[in-house]
Amino acid sequence: MKKNILATIMVCSIALTAVASPSVALADSVDVQIKQQDEKINALKGQQDKAQAEINALESKVASVNEKVSSLEAKQVELSQDTEKLQSEIATLKIRIAKREKSIQKQARDAQTNGQSTNYVNAVLEADSLSDAISRVHAMSTIVNANNDLVKQQKRDQQSVEQNIQENEAKISEMASTQQELQSQKDSLAAQQAELNVLKTTLAAEQATAEGDKAKLNKQKEEAKAAQIKVLKAQQSASEKATAPTAVKADNASDEKKTDAIKDSSTSTSEKPNSPVQETKPVEKPTADTSTPSSDSSTSPGSTSSNGGGIDHSGSGNMYAVGQCTWYVKSVAPWVGTYWGNGCQWGASAAADGYTVNSTPATGAVVVFAAGQSVGGQWTADGTYGHVAYVDSYNAANNTITISQGGTGFSSPTGPNTQTISASGYTYIHR
């Protein structure tokens, strides 16, 4: 009887110990992994803090550059206004020069036909008295001096045109340089900030993964402890049943000692394996596609009529401010003048350059809107600068024109913005 009881106790203890030992070992192994995971999480937090510090520094730099950007943008506006002013002054001077040139040429022809000295002699001979002769000679001298002053003023205006053109081109060059610097600053900051944001996101993802792994390990640990407690309870219950009072009391003490010895051996045979922690794979940084599609705004839409004898400015380049109506028309009709001024001045400027200017609509012509003039009853041209557009087509049956245009008031300032309006009541410049 005693041998059977002892054998039963030993079998139960060995079986339960075999179940409990892996649970204890697993719990200990998970503790090691949790510690390693905590170290990894702390390291990732440190890297995140460092990345955040870099982001904060960059944001401070961004604020500084934004101030510079605002200053440069204000300068761009000022330069654009100066350019418009110079364009207007140049156009006014060129119109004045063209009109004065006709007067000078007429006087030169008169002098060659009649002879200056003959005029003086005739004035003296035809005088009624000496005082009348003196008056006539004085009048002739006044006319000659006036003509000389006219020629001198002509030269001064021509010099002013050249000077204003040089100044205008210098300002346009400065605007282009400023715009390039602005874009470079913005692109550089955007690239750096994007890179740091990617780094921060990557570290956050790694930390989330690490914390998720830690949560799984904690769950495994709790499950192992629960299994261990369950096994120990079962082991204790089996031991109690095996050591219940029997008829042979003299052997109870000996059996209890053996049971305790077995119980001690079952709790001291567990091992603590050191399982490596599985490393999480870092998130790869995405690469941004910074390529942008290119556009060519130099193609002229529509067709043009035959050259009417005006000066062809195709090789002069586009010196108008980008985004203005004058810039758009010059880009699609290169033959128009480089310095014709504001839109409302183009008719007079074109006439001074020898172009046909009238109220007859035609495909390929430039349509001029006076300051404050209604554009097809749909909107009104600027009250100071007027407006110009390119005639893509003319429908004689309906007496309408379809125009393309640019300007700051449109959704696309650099054009083309198309519109169909009545053809009557406007000035047209014909090539």
Image (tube, grey):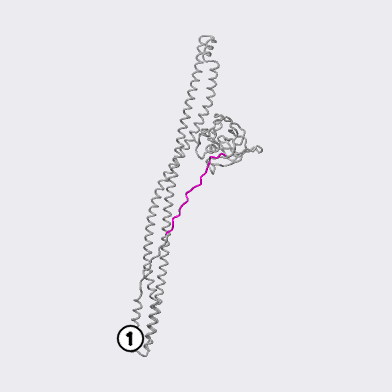
The residue located at (53%, 15%) in the rendering is 115
Q: Quadrant of the N terminus?
A: bottom left
Q: Quadrant of the C terminus?
A: top right
Which residue extends farthest top?
Answer: 129
The residue located at (43%, 50%) in the rendering is 191
The image quarter in which residue 3 lies? bottom left
- Count how many numbered circles sit on residues in the image: 1
The majority secondary structure of the magenta stretch comes to loop
Which residue extends farthest bottom?
Answer: 247
Q: Is residue 114 above or below residue 274?
A: above
The residue located at (41%, 45%) in the rendering is 65
Q: Position of residue 6 (x, y in %)?
A: 37, 85
Q: Position of residue 237 (x, y in %)?
A: 40, 81
Q: Is residue 299 magenta?
A: yes
Which residue extends farthest right?
Answer: 397
Q: Which residues are magenta?
A: 282-300
Element under label 1? helix
**Residue pointed to by mark 1:** 254
Q: Position of residue 242 (x, y in %)?
A: 38, 84
Q: Amino acid at mark 1?
A: Ser
Q: Is residue 420 above or below residue 209?
A: above
Q: Position of residue 100 (x, y in %)?
A: 52, 24
Q: Is residue 135 magenta?
A: no
Mark 1 neighbour class, 10 Å CA radius: few under 14, some 14 to 19, many 20 or more? few
The image quarter in which residue 246 lies? bottom left
Q: Is residue 244 above or below residue 138?
A: below
In this orientation, which residue lies closer to the viewer: 417 or 377?
417
